[in-house]
Image: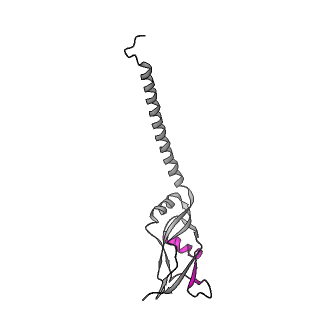
Amino acid sequence: MDTKDGNEPANLLKKGVSLINKNIIVFVFFLFFSFIFWYLNSLGKELEADIRYPVKYTNIPAKKSLTSDMPSRLNLSMKGPGYSILKLKISGRSSPLVIDFSKISYRHAQINQPEDYYILTPPLLQNFNSQIKSACKITSVKPDTLFFSFRPAPR
């Protein structure tokens, strides 16, 4: 056999490694591409998810201030189309749920502590669902009770 290049086995080895590297790149590309299609397909189905959603408190009674640590976020259990849930996860950071003290009923937590109150969150579900304006429905809120205290506002 007459060859011009005496390193033919080395060249074949390089070509083989190059071919394997190209095949791996093509495989990884199509694996990623199939993952994207699978994810988009799953978003079209009915899903359940928990979302940490910001909360804003308004219309605190006159001459009062909230002193205890009210949560700045609530865990909402949602059910709905995956695209709507994804949209809420993304846009939820910019539009908080509003708890309006003039429109909700809060109760005394203890008889001997007149400043301590609590709010039950299940009665707020309908209000929260109307605020998010989405195809998703809130099925539950955690925590289910919000404890807080009113103190006289500083002058």
Q: Position of residue 147 (x, y in %)?
A: 57, 78
Count of numbered badges drawn on the protein: 0
Quick check: 140 left or right of 154? right
Q: Position of residue 94 (x, y in %)?
A: 43, 67
56 or 111: nearer the viewer: 111
The magenta stretch spans residue 12? no
Residue 75 found in image quarter: bottom right
137 or 143: nearer the viewer: 143
Q: Position of residue 30 (x, y in %)?
A: 48, 40
10 to 43, vertically: above or below: above
Q: How is the image coloured?
A: one colour
Q: Quarter of the image containing the N terminus?
A: top left
Q: Position of residue 17 (x, y in %)?
A: 45, 29
Residue 154 found in image quarter: bottom left
25 to 103, vertically: above or below: above
Q: Residue furthest left?
A: 4
53 or 85: nearer the viewer: 53
68 or 39: nearer the viewer: 68
Magenta span covers which residues?
Answer: 103-131
Q: Residue at x 43, y 22 (%)?
A: 10
Q: Residue at x 46, y 61 (%)?
A: 90
The magenta stretch spans residue 113? yes
Q: Quarter of the image containing the C terminus?
A: bottom left
Q: Residue furthest top?
A: 1
Q: Residue at x 48, y 63 (%)?
A: 88
Q: Residue at x 45, y 24 (%)?
A: 13
